[in-house]
Image (cartoon, rainbow, N blue to C red):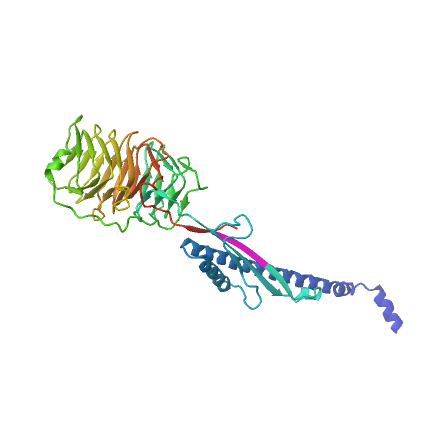
Amino acid sequence: MSLKLLRSFKGSKKGSIAVIFAVTAPVVVGFSALGAEVMYWQYNHRLLQSAADAAAFSGAAQLAQGRSVTDATAAASNAAYETGLKAARADTPAISSPPVSGTFAGDAKAVEVVLSDNLPRMFTGIFYDTDTVRISARAVSRTAGARPACVLALNKSASQAVSFAGSSTLVLQGCDVASNSIASDAIDFQGATDVTTECASAVGGIDGASGSLTLTDCAAPFAGSRPFPDPYEDLVFPASDTCDQALKNNLNVSPGVSRTVSPGTVTTFCTGSPNVMIQGDITFNAGQYIFDGVDVTVNSTASLYGSGVTIFLTGGARLTMNGGADVQLTAPTSDLDPYQGVLVFADPADSNVDHVLNGNSATSFTGALYFPTSDVTFSGTSDEDVSACTLLIADEVEFTGNSFFGSNCDAIGVETAETAQVVLIVE
C-alpha cells in the first residue's frame, strides 16, 4: 500500500506549486521585509531633512533680525527638536555659523545644520552586528536682502503704486525699486519702458516686467516680499514760522532775472495770493524753506540752485517743476542738522496732494525726496553719474520720462531705505 502511494505521488503534479511556494516564500518574505525597512529609513530621512531645513531657517532668521550667532544656534537647535529630531537616539545637532563646508563655507550670513539619527534595525539586524543604522541630513540657510532702494512706494494697497509709463527710461545705479503695496500690479510696467535696476521687489505682484526690466544683481523680480521700512517715519515735520510775504514775492521772478534768497535759519512762505511762479534764476542759500498753503511752480525757463537746502511743503502746498527747468539742489550734509540728507519733505498730514518733478539732463536732486502721503510724477534728471545720490519715497510714484538715480549717499547723510531681509534655504 505504501509503495503504491509513493508511486502515485511521484507521478502527480498537483503538489508542485506547494513545493515551489515552500521554497520561495522565505525569500519573498525576506525581500518584502527588507523593502519595508528601507522605506522606513527613507521616510525617516525625509523627516530628518525637514527638521534640518527648519533648524537652518530658524537660525538664519535670527541673523536677519540682527541677533547674535549664539541666538541663531539656540534657535536652530530648538527648531530641530520641535520638528521631529528624537533626543533619545539622535546625535546633538551640529550647527555652524558661518558654515564649515559647502558653497557657503565662511559666509557670516549663513547657518549650517547637520542632523544625525540612529534608527533601530529590524530585518537587517540579521545581517549586521550593529543594532542601529545611522542617517544624516544637512541644510544651509542664508539671509538675503537689506538692499538699498532708491525708489520706494509706501502705499499698502494701491494698484500701480510704482508705475512706468510711455517710453520712460530709468536707471537705478547700485539700488532697487520697491513697493509696499499688496496689489497684484504693485509695480507696473507699461508701454515701451526700459528700466535698469539691481533688483525690483514688491509685497504684492510685479506686472509687465518682461522685456521692460533689466536686473543687474538678482535673477528675477521678487514678488511677495515683506514690507519695506520707511527710514523717515519718525522724522518730525517743523512748525511754520511767521509768514514772509515779501520774500515770497521775491521768488516770482521773470525769465532772465536772477535772485538769491537767504532764509536765515527758517523762512515760511505763507498762504495767500499769489502762488509762487519761478520763471527766472533763483539761488537758495543754505537753510529751511517752508511753503505753507502756497503752490510752487517752477517754469521751464527757470533755474534753481542751492546747497544745504531743505524744502518743506505743508497746508496742501503743491510742488510742480515743469520740463526743461534746470534744477541743481543739494540737501544739508551736517550731522548737526536734524534734516540731514533731506532735500524735500512733504507734510505727512497732507494726503491726496499730487506733485510733479520734471527736469532735464542738467537736473540734479541730491538727497531724499520724501512725500510719505503724496503721489509724485517724476521725469527727467541728470545723465548717468556714479557720484549721484537721489532717494525718492512717496505714497505712489509714476515715471514718465528718462531719469537716473544713484545711491552714492554716504557723504550726504541720506537714511537708507533698505528692502527687508529674507531667509532662503540655499543648500
Majority secondary structure in the magenta region: strand
The N terminus is located in which quarter?
bottom right
- The residue at 66%/63% (across/down) is 33
Residue 20 in which image quadrant: bottom right
Q: Which residues are magenta?
A: 136-141
Give the tally of numbered discs: 0
Q: Can residue 138 be found in the magenta stretch?
A: yes
Note whether residue 366 is visible: yes
Pick the front one: 23 or 351:
351
Estimate the x, y position of residue 399 in percent, counting from the top left: 31, 36
Note whether residue 185 is visible: no
- The residue at 72%/65% (across/down) is 26
Please, is residue 85 above or below residue 354 in the view? Answer: below
Estimate the x, y position of residue 110 in percent, counting from the top left: 48, 52
- The residue at 70%/62% (across/down) is 28
Pick the front one: 257 or 25:
257
Q: Is residue 309 left or right of residue 198?
A: left
Estimate the x, y position of residue 128 in percent, counting from the top left: 70, 64
Estimate the x, y position of residue 57 in percent, counting from the top left: 47, 55
Q: Can residue 33 be found in the magenta stretch?
A: no
Pick the front one: 34 or 180:
180
Q: Please identify the residue farthest to the top as the structure is shown.
A: 256
Residue 5 in which image quadrant: bottom right
Please, is residue 49 above or below residue 270 in the view? Answer: below
Residue 244 in which image quadrant: top left
